[in-house]
Amino acid sequence: WYQRRSLFSRFDEGIRLDYESWFSVTPEAISNHIAERCKLIVDGFCGAGGNSIQFAKTCERVIAIDIDPNKIKLSKHNSQIYGLERDRIDFICTDFFDWLKSYNTKPDKDRQEIDIIYLSPPWGGVDYKNQEYYYSSERLGRTTSNRNEDPQEESQRNHSFKDLLVECLKASKNLAIYLPMNLDLLDLELAIWMNDQVFYEVEEHWLGDGRCKTLTVYLGKIWSSNQ
């Protein structure tokens, strides 16, 4: 609760979050910094809209995707608090992995070029902070779960981080991934190298209280944009 205005500077004007969003939304200052790099972007796990809102301030178009219809509802509401025009953000309620596979099978003439894909996937619950190291290969596989789904259907929707990375890099060569500060970088490097990616940038996000809050990993041309 005490971080509410760092998450959304206009929180007191009617911003809405569900329980999960309190732990997963990106602080506004971090989202705004990342948005400086973006033009046309797909926000693969938009949640309550923390990133999509900042992206829409500088991008011509944002495609905001989430499997949870309540998250889409929250994101639409919160974007209106910031006075964003509706034509700046396209909200899509679907499984992001399924959306990627559908996009990647379309003929080139039917595909709008994606400059950047931004991923802020679920981190496996709030207990990630209690782990000495956060292993992306183990936990980021649960990227498309819906707590209202039948367990059997949910298990069919769980995809490995490697599979997700493969589909993302088919759709766009520029990728930004928002991750916890206790990420095991060697574990992430293995997934990146398996996709024939050699260079990447890890950026630390420090807040005013002197804490490293999170990391963002950049792949593609976006990697060299601030070198």
Image: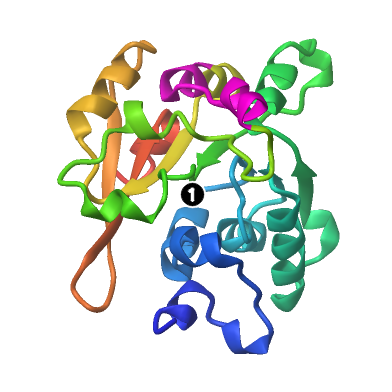
Q: Locate the C terminus and report the quarter of the image it occupies.
A: top left
- Residue, x 21% and y 33% (percent of image)? 185
Q: Position of residue 48 (x, y in %)?
A: 62, 61
Q: Which residues are magenta?
A: 151-166
Q: Is residue 225 left or right of residue 193?
A: right
Amino acid type of the residue that numbered disc 1 sits on in the rendered structure: Arg
Residue 52 is inside the magenta segment: no
Q: Position of residue 135 (x, y in %)?
A: 27, 33
Q: Is residue 111 above or below residue 46?
A: above
Q: Locate the N terminus and report the quarter of the image it occupies.
A: bottom left
Circle 1 residue: 37
Give SS at disc 1.
loop
Q: Residue lying furthest bottom in this view?
A: 12
Q: Position of residue 206 (x, y in %)?
A: 25, 65
* Disc 1: CA contacts within 10 A as few (<14), some (14-19) or many (>=20): some
Front position in the image: 222 or 140: 140
Q: Position of residue 195 (x, y in %)?
A: 39, 13
Q: Is residue 85 left or right of residue 212?
A: right
Q: Is residue 47 left or right of residue 133?
A: right
Q: Main secondary structure of the magenta part?
A: helix
